[in-house]
Amino acid sequence: MDLPEGPPKALATVPKPEVKVSPALSLTALPGECGIRTRQIALLVADGVHGASIAAMHGALSKAGAVGHFVGPRIGAFTTLESGEVEAGKSMENSPSVLFDALVLPDGDKAIETLARNAHTMEYLKDQYRHCKTILALGASRQLLELAGIPASKGKDLGLLMAERDRAAVVAPVFIAAIAAHRHPSRDSDPPKL
């Protein structure tokens, strides 16, 4: 097939580019701005969540400049183990995991049981893991990782953290440092392992 002649050039001579390389626009010019200021973090909640540990994580993230979002199976209030309430402003259905830079899984047997039965939870976990984002599992929420098929890293994956719920405040700085790394490419694989 004969190709038609292309359109005429707008300029007879091609001008020299003013900028050849811009570190300010490069995704590979790391570290860029360090820290987690403005990062969006999902904290999953459901009825029976351990309120003190999830509140401690939310507070530590806010203090570091991140924006923590309580995300539940639905929007609205959820009761905590301590008979308090936590308000989910987002649901897993209307705010998919790709919108968040990291994920916190709560402790609380009833909450974990509810989250384990919800297919959105497994989708959340798998997407966060496949996109090499930071995940923190508090207390018994390790079960959710197992259900999603996410392998225990035993310290090899710096973006997959586990801590007991009473150590939420202690693990917060480690979690924040892991989020500041942005992604954890050591877990990346083609095709994805999950």
Image: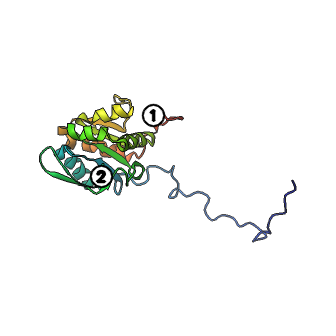
Q: Residue at x 29, y 33 (%)?
A: 142
Q: Residue at x 15, y 43 (%)?
A: 81
> Residue 125: x percent and y percent?
37, 40
**Residue neighbourhood size for the residue with mark 1, other residues' Cα within 10 Å, grouped as few (<14), some (14–19), many (≥20):** few
Q: Residue at x 24, y 46 (%)?
A: 46
The type of residue carrying mark 1 is Leu
Q: Which residue is mark 1?
A: 194
Which corner quadrant holds the C terminus?
A: top left
Secondary structure type for disc 2 = loop
Image quadrant where residue 115 sits:
top left
Left or right, residue 15 beside residue 134: right
Secondary structure type for disc 1 = loop
> Residue 66: x percent and y percent?
31, 55
Left or right, residue 128 beside residue 50: right
Q: Which residue is mark 2?
A: 74
Look at the image and name its color scheme.
Answer: rainbow
Q: Is residue 104 visible?
A: yes
> Residue 32: x percent and y percent?
44, 53
With respect to residue 180, does 147 lie above or below? above
